[in-house]
Image: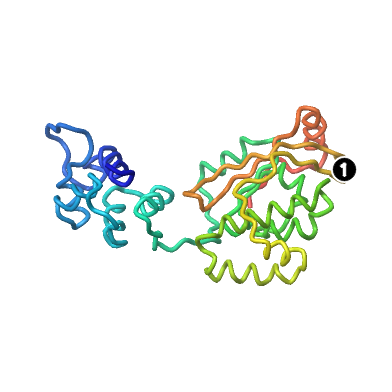
Amino acid sequence: MNELGAFLRARRAARSPEAAGLPGGGRRRAPGLRREELAALAGVSVDYLVRLEQGRQHEPSAEVLRALAAGLGLDGEARRHLFGLAGRTDPQPVDPAVRTVPAPLRRLLLAAHPAPAWVLNRRSDLVARNGAADALLGEPVDGANYVELVTGVLRPLWADPALVVQDAVAHLRAATADVRDHPAVTGLVRRLSAAPEFAALWARREVRAACSPARTVRHPQAGELGFDVQLLAAAGGDLQLVVLEPHPESRERWTAYLEGPGRPRLRLA
């Protein structure tokens, strides 16, 4: 059995007949969908599915993979993983500029306080943030592009601006690798490339899914502060939660600044 076959068997075992829209009940020798049930849902023969699960059928078509993903209830990362195991690219269109933030992710933004936290989509647009993020970033315009901000108005905020910009550009390339020809991406890159610094960094083709783990901020009111950077992929990889956790020696001063008069208590774009 190869990895594709093992994945299909595991996901089939985890899929209940009721979740797949089939009658439940009755005694089953094994949990999950029977082979004949998944084969019927995907429109393939039972023999074909057996060969796939046993690693004797290679290179299934995109149409078969799409049908199997639907029958197994796969979406997001799980669907892309299935296509990757078969050596294919998922043809399902991805919106690199998605702006809908799930409620659980918004709750994480609130729970992160007093740590500044924000959500980026694949093209690094700021689609949500908390009040601590506004206090750090200066309440940018809703939907502003993070790469554009760090190469422009936010550049003086960082003690190491060149590294922050390098990280941001390399992360943008990594996040948009599979949607690089999407108009929302090509248009953004064309606009950002008007700045020589971005154009030079983009031409280096560095790819970085993560970023440097620590940041030193020179805040105009709160002074110099240290933060640890945490990244969390969400919504099947289409969104990313960024959290800047204050260093112990900076936390009390940062919290005192946030609780000062006139500071925002909550902000969600």
Q: Residue at x 25, y 38 (%)?
A: 13
Q: Is 2 placed above or below 97 here? A: above
Q: Residue at x 80, y 54 (%)?
A: 155
Q: Nearer the viewer, residue 197 or 78?
A: 197
Q: Residue at x 65, y 40 (%)?
A: 243
Q: Tell me how many marks there are.
A: 1
Colouring scheme, one of rainbow, by chain, secondary structure, one colour = rainbow
Q: Secondary structure at mark 1?
A: loop
Q: Residue at x 29, y 53 (%)?
A: 70
Q: Nearer the viewer, residue 208 or 250?
A: 208
Q: Residues within 10 Å of mark 1 (few under 14, many from 20)?
A: few
Determine whether, in the image, residue 223 is placed left or right of residue 198: right
Q: Is 212 placed above or below 253 here? A: below
Amino acid identity at mark 1: Gln
Determine whether, in the image, residue 164 is placed left or right of residue 41: right
Q: Give residue 132's quadrant in the image.
A: top right
Query: Which of the image's four quarters has the N terminus?
Result: top left
Determine whether, in the image, residue 240 is placed left or right of residue 146: left
Which residue carries the number 1 mark? Answer: 221
The percent coordinates of residue 150 (x first, y second) are 75, 55
